[in-house]
Amino acid sequence: MVIQLQPVEVDVEPLVTRVFLKAIDLLGGLQKLAEYRTLTWLPSLARASFAIVLREEYLKTEEEIAELVGLTKQTVRNILRADPELAMYKIQHIDELTQEEKKELRVHTAGGIAKLAYKLVKEGHEEPKIFLEYCTQTAEALDIPWAYMVLKRIKGTDFPIHSPEDIKEKLVGVMIKGRKAEEVVEEIEYPIKNPAELLHRIKENLKMHGIE
């Protein structure tokens, strides 16, 4: 899936990715989408996620969003005006959708799901399974052994994490740049909302100790 965007002066992708993954989570995950043969919905969800974040976080106009995301102004307007409750009602009754609706996600539905996903992410309701898997794959791809091991060990952990006791036992035996992981997590600040924030705080701790 390739979404072509025009250059933008702000880095929207981290938050857009979180919203997009939360949207998939709301739909039951990739496996559920595959079962219903609705993986064709993903590009629409991605564009809707971009549109919602650009509007809510950066106050972009409909015209600016349309240019950046590659949509018509009317499509952007429909996304921004979408009703989250109506969108979720349709998803909960997915069996009743026509074959055409299953093949192509309606603009209003994509916008409604993205709106709800954005709201939940901002409230700290992260996408536990999908987001953790995404972070794990990214750490592996970037060849960051300690990050990969930390993420693999904490699978099944509920976020937010409120204290080191929530994860210390799972990290026994993991070394982070020559330091014991359970000692590192004793020194970082809590609560931690999601796996990405955990890795960020570990990296900040390493920097404090002069470890790159």
Image (cartoon, rainbow, N blue to C red):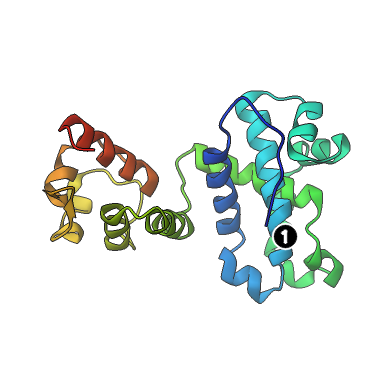
Residue sitting at 75 percent across and 32 percent down? 65
10 Å crowding of disc 1: few (<14), some (14-19), many (20+): some
Q: What x and y, as percent, mark residue 115?
A: 65, 42
Q: What x and y, as percent, mark residue 40?
A: 73, 64
Residue 12 falls in image quadrant: top right
Any part of residue 79 in sight: yes
In-front residue for pair 94/153: 153
Q: Quadrant of the N terminus?
A: bottom right
| Residue 9 sits above or below residue 76 on the image | above
What is the residue that sits farthest to the bottom in this orientation? 35
Q: What x and y, as percent, mark residue 105?
A: 78, 58
Q: Amino acid at mark 1?
A: Trp
Classify residue 141 as left or right of residue 39: left
Q: Which residue is mark 1?
A: 41
In-front residue for pair 177/84: 177
Residue sitting at 69 percent across and 53 percent down? 2
Residue 16 falls in image quadrant: top right
